[in-house]
Amino acid sequence: MIVTLAFYVFAAILLLSACMVITARNPVHSVLFLILAFINAGALFVLAGAEFLAMVLVIVYVGAVAVLFLFVVMMLDVDFAALREGFQRYAPLGLLIGFILMVEIGAVAIGWTITPAAHLASQVPMPAHLSNTAALGDLIYTRYMFAFELVALLLLVAMIGAIVLTHSGERRSRRQDISTQHQRPIDETLTMVKLGIGKGAKQMTQAAPAKRETIR
């Protein structure tokens, strides 16, 4: 009874926080609701007996991805008013795509049936010499090895694409040219000034030419 009640509580909070992620006007609040959704999803994994997936969800997504989203949203000066200016222009297309998706999801839900042998899958006993984590690793790296490698390849391509898009724009930062620095003559970079007692600042101002480095 307690496990069932905990499941409904965590599931309700998960659904509510997921809805708040997409409906909250403040992006910081959206990320905080996303963290809450991840934590409740991890609690559901614990109730299902998948404690390894729960720890991975909390450590990777809550501890790294969601916090990274939070820092990016807080540090970037995004003009959300400008982003919403084209909402009315693309609203008909968005509604059309949303309607098509809802029709497809409804068609799948109507034609979806539970096989009579589905309850047998949860009754398969786990080998006594394997823990939950070991059994999961055995499935990933044996039966689902190709799918695992394919996901890793997709993530690699996405990372390379993000790096290429970042460096494809106009370069605004100054870059150091070592060869040009080595070829400059000394008289264009340094000015030797002999300072007298009590005349350092005034004499240096008069002797040092503009845009040159001065050594005392």
Image (tube, rainbow, N blue to C red):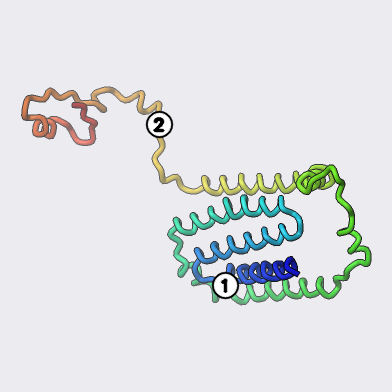
Q: What element carries label 1?
A: helix
Q: Which of 29 and 190 is in front in this view?
A: 29
Q: Is residue 15 above or below residue 146?
A: below
Mark 2 / mark 1, whichever is N-terminal = 1
Q: Locate residue 123: give its quadrant.
A: bottom right
Nearest-to-viewer mark from 2 and 1: 1
Q: How far apart are marks 2 and 1 (CA)?
A: 50 Å
Residue 147 visible at all: no
Q: Locate residue 121: give its quadrant.
A: bottom right
Q: Farthest residue in the right direction?
A: 116
Q: Which of 100 and 141 is in front in this view?
A: 141
Q: Residue 23 carries which label?
A: 1
Quadrant including the N terminus: bottom right
Mark 1, residues whose alpha carbon is within 10 Å: few (<14), some, or many (≥20)?
Answer: few
Amino acid tagged 2: Asp
Residue 49 visible at all: yes
Direction from residue 133 to residue 127 in the image, left or right: right
Q: Is mark 2 on a helix, strand or loop?
A: loop
Task: Residue under label 2, please give it.
Answer: 177
